[in-house]
Structure formats: C-alpha cells, structure tokens
Amino acid sequence: MEESSSLALDLNYYKGVLYRRRYPALAIGLIVLSVFTWGSFLLPKTYEASATVYIQGTSLVNPIMQGVGVTVSLEERLRNLRNILTSRSLTERVIKKLNLDAHVRNPTQYEGLLEGLKKSLTVTVKSGGATSSDLFFTIAYRGGDPKQVVDLVNTHISESIAINERSRTEDAQGAFTFVERELGEYRAKLDASDKRIRQFREKHPHLVPQSEHTIVGRIEGFETGRIDAEIKLRELVKRRESITKQLSGEKELSVAVVTREGTPQSRLSALNSQLMVLSTKFTDDYPDVIKVKNEIEELKKQIASAQLNKQVLDAIESERSAPNPVYQQLKEDLAKTDTEVDTLRARQREMERQQRESQRVLQKLPVEMEEWTKLQRDRTIFQKIHDDLLLKMESARVSRDLELGQNTTFRVMDPPLEPRLPLSPNRVKMILLGLFFGMASGVGVVLGLDYLNPSFKSEERVRSSLNLPLLASIHEIISQEDQAEIKRLDHKYFRAAAVYLGIIGLVFFEAVFHQLFGIRIINF
Amino acid sequence: MSRIEQALEKAAQLRQDEREIEMNEPGKKAEQPSSRPVFFFQKPVFDLQAVHRHIVCITQPSSPTAEEYRKLRARICRRTEKDFFNTIMITSSFDGEGKSITALNLAVALAQDIDHTVLLVDADLRRPSIHTYLGITPKHGLSEYLQSRVQLQDILIQTGIGKLVLLPAGTPPKNPSELIASRKMRDLIVDLKYRYRDRYVLFDSPPLLTAADGIYLKDSIDGALFVIQALRTSEKSAHRALELLKGTHLFGTVYNNVPEYLLTNGVSYYGRIPKAGENDMVHAAMLMKNAEHSFRTLCDSKKVQKIGSKIKSGKDGLMKWTKKS
C-alpha cells in the first residue's frame, strides 16, 4: 500500500512538473521534431540500385575428380568471390568504363573517387541453388543520381564476370607454376644437403656410424690390451735376463755328458747355494730342503762315478770340440724372446696410438655429432618438403586441368532498376523518430532541470534542512485572473503548436503517400 | 442608498468627529493609550478592485490560502502572547520570494481578529511594494519620517481593514541602510512596540542576502519570520540568510507559493478557486460584516441612544396620538 501510494505521489509529482514546465517541454519537443523533419529536406538524397547474380558451376568432371585435385572449400570460394567483387582493380575498371574520372585532375581526387565508390558499394555473397557449388551475389550501389547507380551496378556485374573468368584461369595456372617453382628450389636444396653429408662422412670416416659408448668401449679395450702387453713384456724381459744369465754360464762347445741344467759341478754348486738359501728359511724336514739334499747326493754320486770311469773322461775330452746343445738351445730361446719382446713393444705402441686417437675422437664427438645431426635434419626436412611439393604439384596439375575444363554460367536473376524513391533520408521514419525523440527530450530536459534544481521541493525538506518550525505552507495563489491568463496563454501556445504540428503532419502524410503510391502531392 | 450603507456612512462621520476631538486634546489621548484602539473601522481607503489578487485575505477571504494565513496568524499568536513579542520582521533570502505578500496577508489576518490591532511597516525602503499591493499611492512614508520631514501621524494610513494601519515606505531614499540603522528608527520601533500592548507591529524588511537593512533591523525587533519560496529559494541561500539572522528569535518559516504537486496533504487548490462573481460576494460579505460592526457601535453610542429614545418617545407619542385619533 505504501509503495503504491508513494508511486502515485511520484507520478503526480512528475505530472505536476511536466504541467508546470509544459511550455519549455513543448518548445524542446517541437524543436527536436523540427530538426528531424526539416533536416530530412536538407539531407542529400541517396538512391540505391541492386542486382542479384546467380553463378552455376556445370562441370561433369568435377564430381568424378573430387578428391584427386585440390578442392576449394565453400567458404573459401565465397571469400574469393567477395574479394574479387570488392577489389580495387574491379572498381578501377568500372570507373574507367563509365568515364567517371573525366573530371579527376590529380591522384588525390582519384583516390577520393575510388574510396567513395567503394563506400557506396555493398556486396552480399551466399551459396545455395541446385547444388552447394552454386553461388549468389548481390551488388548494390548508393549515390545521389538514380541513373548513375544503375549504370554502376550493370558495369560492376559485367566487369566482375570478365575478371572472374580470367582470374580463375590465372589462379589455376598460377598455383601450378608456383608449386613447380618451389619444387625446383627444394630439389636443389636437397642435392646440396646430400653433398654436404657426403663431404662430412669423407672428412670424418671414423665418426659415422659411431656412438660415444662405442668409443669409450674401444678406449677401454685399448687400455686393457696395453696393460696386458706391458705385463707380458715385463715377463719376457725377465725371461730374457734369465736366458742371458744362463747363456753366460755355458760354453759354446762342451762335452757330451752334460745335463740340461749344466755341468755336474756347476749344478752341484747351484744346488748347494739353493740349499743354503733354503736352510736359512726352512727346517731340514721341509720337502724342498730334503729334495735339494737328495739331488746333491745324487749329483755327488754321479761325479764320483764319472771320475772313476776314465773312458767316460776321454769321451768327454773328445766331445769338447762339438757345439754345446744347451748353449744352442739358450741362444734360440734368447732370439725367440727378443722377437716376442719386439712384437709386444710394437703392439703396445699401437695400442697407445689407437687409444689416443679414440680419445681425440671422443673429445671432438659432440661438435661433430651436432654438425652431423644438423646435416641429417636439414636433409630430412628438405626431403619431406620436396616429397610434399611433388605431391602438390601433381594435385595442382589435376586442379588446373579441372578448372580449365570447367564451364561456369553467370545469370543475372534480379536486374537493377532505376530507383523511384530515395533510400535516405526516409522522411516518414525521420518524422516518427523526431516525434519520439522530441517527446523524450522535452520530458527528459524538464525532469532533468527539475532534478538539478537545488531549491526546496517539499515541506519535509524545509523542516529537516532548516531545523525550524514550519508555520505555514501557502499554496500557489492562482486567482481567477491568473487562471484566465493561464488559459489564454495555453490556448495561444497550444494552438500555435497544433498548427505547427499540423504542418508537420501534412508533411508526414505526404511522405507516406509518396512512399505508398509514388505520387507527390506537394513537391518540396 | 441602502440602510446599511447609510449606517456605514454615518458611523464613518461619527468616527471622524471623534478623531478630531482626540487630535484637539492630545494630552487626554496620551493618558489613556490602551483604553481603546486608535484605528478603528471605517470605509476602506483603497479601491477593493485595485487590491492585488495575491492578497487573498482581502480578495478571497474564504479560500484555503486565506485559511492558511489564518493558521499562520494562530501559530504566531501562540508563540508571541506569552513573552509580549509584538514586533515581527518578515524577511527572506532574495527579492520576490513573497515576503511582502506574506506580511500583508498576515497583517490582514491579524487585523481581522477582534483582539488585535496591527501596524504594518513597509521597511523595504529600496523597493517598497505594500502600497502597490493595496493599490494606493501615499505621498509620504517611513523614509520621510526618518529624515524628519514629516510627523508620524501624517504618514499612518488607516486601511479600513479591521484594525490594520499601514506605515508605507515612502519615496525610496539614497541611503536606505543608514536610515534603517538610525537611532530614530530604533526609537520608532520601541515606541511602536510599547505604545499599544495589544498591537502587532509587522516589518516587511528587505531581503537579507541583497541588502544590509534587514541585519540592522533584526537587532531592534522581537523575532523574525523567514519566507521560503517553493522551487525558487535554494537550500544554500536559505542557510546563508539564516546565518545572518543568528541571535534573532526565529518564530519559524513560511513555505510560500507551493504548487499543487508539491503538496503532501493532497488537497487540490484549483478546485477551490472562487468562481466568477465570488469576489463580489466576498466584498459584499466584508461590507456586511463591517456594517454590522458599525451598526453595533452606532447603537452603543449616546447620540444614537438619544435618537433612539427620541424615536421611541416619538413612537410612543405617535401611538398615543393614533389611539386618540
């Protein structure tokens, strides 16, 4: 209840404000209405002519070859068509054909003319018809001269058809040529890449194909071999020293009774020496000591028996002139050992060299591998692009042949007609808009000014703001004379407003009549 | 000429005689200042048709607006009777906010009260307007009195509306502030305040924010009434004006010239505007009221009583003569 009463109060308030300020509200409303109404006479007239063209593709090959050649999507076709229709070259051809640049004196004026034409042109492209490949486009031109806009539309259509035909051929051929040229370039690049790889392999034969692990394994192998050779060499050197030592104790020519270990005396002395050494270390019960003692005993017996046998001694004496086989044997062993030592040294050196080489390769491996990877990658890319281009070239060849063999029909479905009524200004619409905006602005300005008025607008405000008792609220005094004066003024102003609105109404109905029947009652 | 009009004329003549007697015997008058009002009923000094239509207490006394002024009168009386606050300044922030109309309507409303005598002083020496609202053209006024060119009794105008006397502003002087701030003005206010205890003295002062006169005046009067015009007086200017009135007893505010749509009680004023001819009726009613009052006064007077007794004796003689014949 309170809300509704407050709403009613608000409405009464606004009604009161509007009534009180009815003259300014009316004046503002009429001014705005006048601006719209008379502005519609002052604004330049714009006419529009338009035509719809149907493009029908009739190629029989097209469905069969679909998927073989490059198929252009519908959106792309629409976009291409729109680009052609709004292209600068087409507009220039239209200007030239209609001789619109007859009065153009400099490039700036020409650019202005071009821009003006492009702005006045509206192009709508859509697909449809019997098949999805059929397209429609609508061309509309706006301008101040109704005849000129019709000419512009006609010329634009004829020129766009010619350009479309030519551009279709050029596009197909151009695509093929482009792909072919690109293919040639990539073939050259691929060859160059192959050459670089070959040169690299020649330069780094050890590198390819090798990995870091392989080289490290090889280095380890070389190291192991070298160590083995070293050990073996040391053994051989010892052995050689032993042989040399033995060889120095032997005579080149000796008696026949010799043991492999030497003469019995030398052998005996050796065994004695050995026994002495062993005795210092071990007890007499140690097997080696017992064994050496036994050998000494045996040898002593042999020496004793040899001394007793004179024949034997003679024979020994006779055999002194023959080569000593032990000596010979040792000589041979020495020679053999020397050979082995030399071999091992040579092997060791080779191992070291191989190891150094492998280490050098290992150090250079990252840089070389990087270069190698780059070469490989370049080649892979070039190869891939080359293969793609090769494929595309074949597709382009088919598309070109397909496009050239296609037969497209252009049919003007809706030819341009000379416009009878201007597109703008639409007087009916402008007057209606003026009426609406006039009312809105009249009401808005008055209420806005009231809102901005900082004066006291209620008794409550007087009480609360001044903090003084409100002794009386004196109503606005409107006497009989005042009322008569108000009435007189209202009559005067509203009559004048009504007359003025009547004139605007007349203009409005004339415009409506002209729009509906095309007949001018009053030619403004 | 009707009987009422004849009676009114006779009463006016009698009143004139009485005044002549009083002026010839000033000492007698000074001795008994409050025994009876100085200014009494008589025929209005102004043409009723010339009164401004916004003086509703005269032109439309039965209208709701006139009733509002009567309410204002009641509230003022209630606030002043205890402390003998009888000198009241009516002021506003700026010109044209309705202080003179408020002052005049309030003065008329107070004057119509049987118990009060009212003196309305047009203290706006710059743009005096009270006399124009009443449609009169006084030769002299307050400015001439303050310049000692005339005597007070020569400039007081008995309006004939109840017991309302007007002290007009006179010719606008070159130094209004100085005149208002003068000792003579202060003495005059004191004199007017204390001469008649049942009299209200209303001062229509210049606006506070455009002239200093009101500020000088406020120190001599008992209280002030602040007039605000709806949709015109801004809050800022009202506050500034009230700042200037600091130290003065403020009876309250009068929210003036309020359009119908701002009224919170929802009373439509337009429906109550007197129809054609109503003013004449109002005038006639006022004349009747005045005539009635005059008739009663006349009946109370000795001469009339003598005449009445003569008429009565004449009537008795006539009756006797008739019986005899």
Image (cartoon, rainbow, N blue to C red):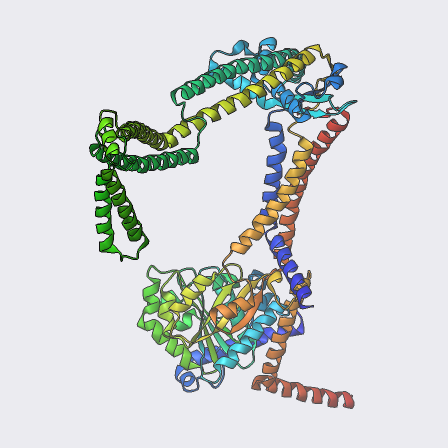
Instruction: Tell me what residue is drawn at x 54 percent, y 75 percent.
Output: B73
**Does B99 sit left or right of B286 as displayed?**
left
Which image quarter: residue A183?
top right
Instruction: Tell me what residue is drawn at x 45 percent, y 60 percent.
Output: B95
Query: Is A432 drawn above or below residue A114 in the view shown?
Result: below
Query: Is A501 drawn above or below residue B262 in the view shown?
Result: above
Which image quarter: residue B1?
bottom right
Q: Position of residue B138 (x, y in %)?
A: 45, 63
**Does B299 sit left or right of A359 as displayed?**
right
Whether residue A111 is visible here, answered yes or no, is yes
Frontmost residue, A184 versus A293: A293
Q: Position of residue B69 (x, y in %)?
A: 56, 71
In the rendered picture of this protein, how many numbered marks are placed on residues? Answer: 0
Frontmost residue, B47 versus A242: A242
Instruction: Tell me what residue is drawn at x 66 percent, y 12 percent.
Output: A165
**Does A328 sit left or right of A191 as displayed?**
left
Q: Position of residue B274 (x, y in %)?
A: 67, 63
Query: Is B80 drawn above or below residue B52 in the view shown?
Result: below
Instruction: Tell me what residue is drawn at x 71 percent, y 17 percent.
Output: A416
Q: Position of residue A273 (x, y in %)?
A: 21, 47
Query: Is B119 drawn above or below residue A523 in the view shown?
Result: below
Quarter of the C terminus of chain A within the rendering: top right
Which image quarter: residue B314?
bottom right
Quarter of the N terminus of chain A within the rendering: bottom right
Frontmost residue, A239 versus A463: A239
Whether residue B138 is visible here, answered yes or no, is no
